[in-house]
Amino acid sequence: MNLAVWLHRQAQARPDRPALYAGRDLVADYAAFAARAAAVGAWLRGQGVRPGDRVAIFMKNAPDYLIAQYGIWYAGAAAVPINAKLHGREAAFILENSGTRLAFTSPGLTEALQAAGVSCPLVDISDDDWARVQQAEPLPEPVPRAPDDLAWLFYTSGTTGRPKGVVITHRMLIAVSLAYFTDVDAASGADAILYAAPMSHGAGLYNMLHVLVGARHVCPPSGGFDPAEIFDLARHHGRVHMFAAPTMVKRMTEAGRAAGETGEGLRTIVYGGGPMYVADILQAVDHFGPVFVQIYGQGECPMGITALSRDEVADRTHPRWRDRLMSVGRAQAPVELRIGAVDGTPLPPGEVGEIMVRGDVVMPGYWQNPEATAKTLRDGWLMTGDMGFMDEHGYVTLQDRSKDVIITGGSNVYPREVEEVLLTHPAVREVSVVGRRHLDWGEEVVAFVVGDADPAELDRLCIDRIARFKRPKDYLFLPELPKNNYGKVLKTELRKLLEDGQ
């Protein structure tokens, strides 16, 4: 089934329901939203775009983003979302690798692609051409697509080498959308979704389920993440859902405490995409209340591996509440989950191994990359590359990426365990732990710290709480940690600093 059918049905049933907002301003109801998307689809067909062709979206967050996306689906084509924070050359690689026929862009990003010498046609949403596109005679309905047809070609944010294109099908997006209602949260036409994180990534993957229920879609005028703007829009619109990376939650908490903002109007904040440290989520819940839900996924299984409910995130009465809060929850409905040894053999509860997942949310493979697909998919199981363990109740606790595990003197050290301890020090704002080569031990533990804590105090903290072999042998202070466009700490860059002796 073509996902654009959900928009088509909503426009038929509730045409006057408000749909798209730019800040506080209504841009389109569901009738206009569907009509404009159907016109974009018709225009694309007129340009020779056929079912299965790829059409890119290199845009900042805006209502037009959704019009373009659903227009692509109306035409039966596949969307290629590109993070607006990427360099023009990086975006150009994605256009070339995906075989994109055409790209929708926004001001500034058009020029970046032109400077990179892209060859495909570009349609800037600030130009008159975009207005003419939306004035085409609309398609009467979305072009039919099979469940396993490509819907969304997502390029990974890998920290080494070229990004890989993850094939995401209509079936996968339908499965993760329906799993939201069973495993993450309820949603209805009375709600609003606020896009403060890139719509090319996790935030955008939640737009479909909100179209399904006829909710409002709110794009901040800034086009990005601004805590003050979020607080204002949440208070104005009410019943706001949003997706946020853990670093965004931390910044919202700090900003809310400083400005006396309680998060009025925020109904649900789904967080994921990186490690959420216990100290940070405790502060967030204490300030904003029980509005947080955690999900764990990756591009190859988008938003759909595990979930930890709002009640479990907020609970402080269960005998094992802290252990559960440190976990990423339990398997979502559409997937099977196991912890495997190196050869994929299932491990018993409590033993650390690689997290493996299979089901309707798992990709069929990487775009035109059979070698990478064969390495990542084994007998239908996605080898996530994430290390963790599952307890007897099904709660999964992440340790680290397999490549980030530090082996010192033959013993494994999982950086996150050390980071959790260091973050309890009030003068530590951020921390990242990596391994440094050592002639005798293989590797030694090193902590990069943002803050002004005394290393001796950090040492005592570790000695009091974790085994001595896990204690950092060095504390290196930085003004900030290097991060990628999604807010993930680039441990590869930190290792390079050590190798270069900086």
Image (tube, rainbow, N blue to C red):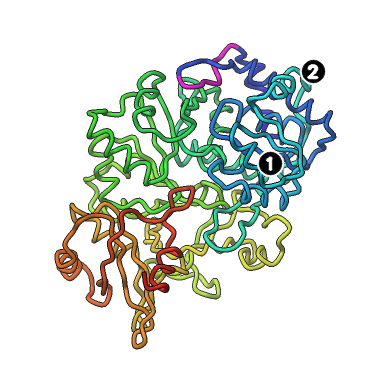
Locate residue 385 relative to residue 32 in the image: left or right: left
Hey, what amino acid is under mark 1? Gln
Hey, what amino acid is under mark 2? Glu
Locate residue 16 relative to residue 499 in the image: left or right: right
In the rendered image, residue 22 lying in the magenta stretch gets the answer yes
Q: Which residues are magenta?
A: 16-23
Which residue shows up at 82% across the image and 37% down it?
Answer: 50
In the rendered image, residue 330 lying in the magenta stretch gets the answer no
Which residue shows up at 38% across the image and 63% down it?
Answer: 399
Residue position marked by numbered label 2 in the rendering: 137
Picture layout, residue 96 above or below residue 102: below
Residue position marked by numbered label 1 in the rendering: 114
SS at mark 1? helix
SS at mark 2? loop
Picture layout, residue 171 above or below residue 418: above
Quarter placement of the N terminus: top right
Which residue shows up at 37% across the image and 79% down it?
Answer: 443
The image shows residue 416 at horizontal and vertical percentages of 34, 62
Which residue shows up at 54% across the image and 37% down it?
Answer: 199
Circle 1 residues within 10 Å: few <14, some 14–19, many ≥20? some
Locate residue 354 relative to residue 327 in the image: left or right: right
Residue extending furthest toward the top: 16
